[in-house]
Image (cartoon, helix red, strand yellow):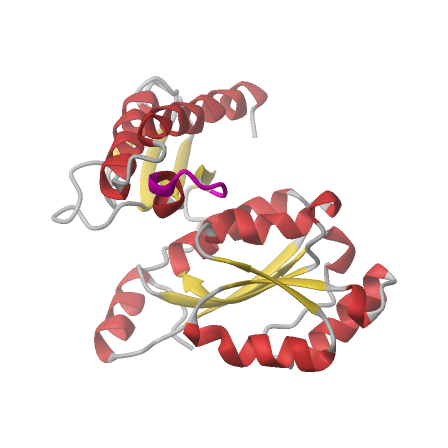
Amino acid sequence: MNRNLALNLVRVTEAAAMNAAKLMGRGDKNLADQYAVDAMRKMFDTIDIEGTVVIGEGEMDEAPMLYIGEKVGSGAAQAPKVDIAVDPLDGTTCVSKGLPNAVSVIAVAPEGCLLKAPDMYMRKIAAGPKCRGVIDLNASVAENLRNVGKALDKDMEDLTVIIQDRERHWDIIDQVREAGARIRLFQDGDVISAISTCFEETGVDLFMGTGGAPEGVIGAAAIKCLGGEMQGQLVINNEDEKRRCEEKGADCG
């Protein structure tokens, strides 16, 4: 990516984060999210791109700004055509309670290169650069832990898995503990928790669980840039979700 464009995109997330920070600890997660959306949308107008939001705040009738299909950027002559996935504020509850782990994120790729994931669940597994090629979404928890341990030259009891503290993950949590590894639970902040696997200083070796598909796409983009690996599979719970996947051209398998 053009260096100047990359730096300008940082300004987009910076504006959203700083505006949302005005609501830190004030107990209103919806207003914090709106502050982030407003600032991000305004800053996009200053960027020389011809962008299309493919993952955003919802469909056009659900969101006044940064909705799926919205055109953003200055649209200047010869501006690059790009697809954009946005999450102006991932971790709205964190901001409303004055807690860490909230982040403003965007992913930008050449037109047609981002998965147009519907707002539904996705199974996920992620690990850092040293574990690229050794994780497998369809393998057992124990097998993934053994492979990650070999790649990192760590004993099982020294491995740490980060998992969102939700009832749907109780089975995964039990399997990690049975295998002998450690667990770090988080309440909110799916994107930053997945990305944490790519930084040794976090002490996080593996990310596992089921969470939002849009956050999965954004997290995967960041992890790819950092040299790590993330795998995901959309979770189809009903015919409506299957239809929405098919409409967006997403794999329903």
Residue 119 in the image: state x and y as whole percent: 31, 59
Left or right position of 75 against 17: left
Q: Report the residue at 25% width, 66% height from top.
A: 244
* Residue 28 point in image, percent of width and height: 25, 40
Place residue 166 in its image quadrant. Answer: bottom left
Q: Which residues are magenta?
A: 96-101
Quarter residue 252 falls in:
bottom left
Q: Position of residue 241 (x, y in %)?
A: 27, 71
Residue 2 visible from this viewpoint:
yes
Residue 40, placed above or below residue 140: above
Q: Is residue 86 visible?
A: no
Quadrant in which the C terminus appears:
bottom left
Q: Is residue 105 left or right of residue 150?
A: left
The image quadrant where one finds the N terminus is top right
Between 64 and 71, which is closer to the camera in this rendering?
64
Magenta-colored stretch includes residue 46:
no
Residue at the image point whose x is 47% and y is 53% from the top: 190
**Main secondary-structure element of the magenta-colored stretch:** loop
Where is residue 243? Give x, y as percent.
Answer: 24, 72
Between 81 and 216, the residue placed more toward the observer is 216
Magenta highlight on residue 100: yes
- The residue lying furthest to the right in this view is 153
In depth, the one of 10 and 30 nearer the eye is: 30
| Above/below status of 169 relative to 28 | below
